[in-house]
Image (cartoon, rainbow, N blue to C red):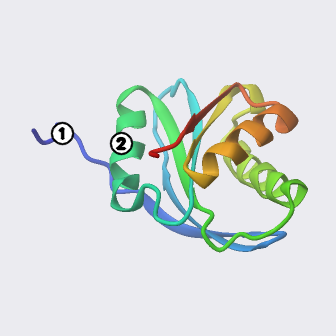
Amino acid sequence: MSPAVWITPESDHLETVLGTVAIAQVDLGGVPRGAVLVMSADGDVGYEVAQILNDLAVHGYESIAADLTPMQGTDDALIEVVGELVHHLGKRGWQSDQIGVIGYGRGGRLALLASSQVGLGAAVSISPS
């Protein structure tokens, strides 16, 4: 079944303390319900990123997906990267309590760590194994 509406995510890069992070972003008009940061690494979601962002859009959430594959560092440095991604969402007017994070695989642990330190509205960790 094909979706009634498909939004092609905008590709971009964000400079962080640990280097450049590739992101895909879906911005919505009107009055979205909130924003979601989707984190993956090592091909955890791959081609499904656009589908995940569109599924979130159907439910009224703006979103960005960040590929953390090249990120290597301490937990504190990785949490700082998440903080920079949250700040990027904040440029669209979102406060941290209006932002949720979903982490896949290696990004799942980081999602839980970061949400407790950055003060996000929700956190979900998904491990395919």
Q: Is residue 27 left or right of residue 117?
A: left
Q: What residue is rendered at 42% in x and 55% in y?
A: 45
30 or 72, nearer to the observer: 72
Question: Where does label 2 land, which residue?
Answer: 54
Mark before the other along the chain sequence, 2 or 1: 1
Residue drawn at 46 percent across, 46 percent down: 129
Image height of 59 relative to 22, above or below: above
* Pointer 1 residue: 3
In this view of the protein, which residue sits in the foreground, 11 or 72? Answer: 72
Given residues 40 and 56, the one toward you in this image is 40
Q: CA distance from mark 2 to mark 1?
A: 9 Å
**Residue 68, placed above or below residue 64:** below
**What percent of the width, then of the height, locates residue 75?**
85, 55
Say what secondary structure mark 2 lies in: helix
Please, what is the three-letter code of the amino acid marked with disc 1? Answer: Pro
Q: How many marks?
A: 2
Q: CB under 8 Å between callouts 2 and 1? A: yes
Q: Is residue 107 left or right of residue 120?
A: left
**Residue 113 vs residue 39: left or right?**
right
Residue 83's place in the image compared with 34, above or below, is: below
* Image quadrant occupied by the N terminus: top left
Residue 12 position in % (x across, y down): 55, 68
Q: Which amino acid, mark 2?
A: Asn
Residue at point 50% right, 54% down?
Answer: 25
Q: Crowding near pointer 2: few (<14 within 10 Å), some, many (20+)? A: many
- Left or right of 75? Residue 88 is left
Please give the label number shown on residue 102. none
Q: Quadrant of residue 15?
A: bottom right
- Give the percent coordinates (x, y) of residue 90: 73, 43
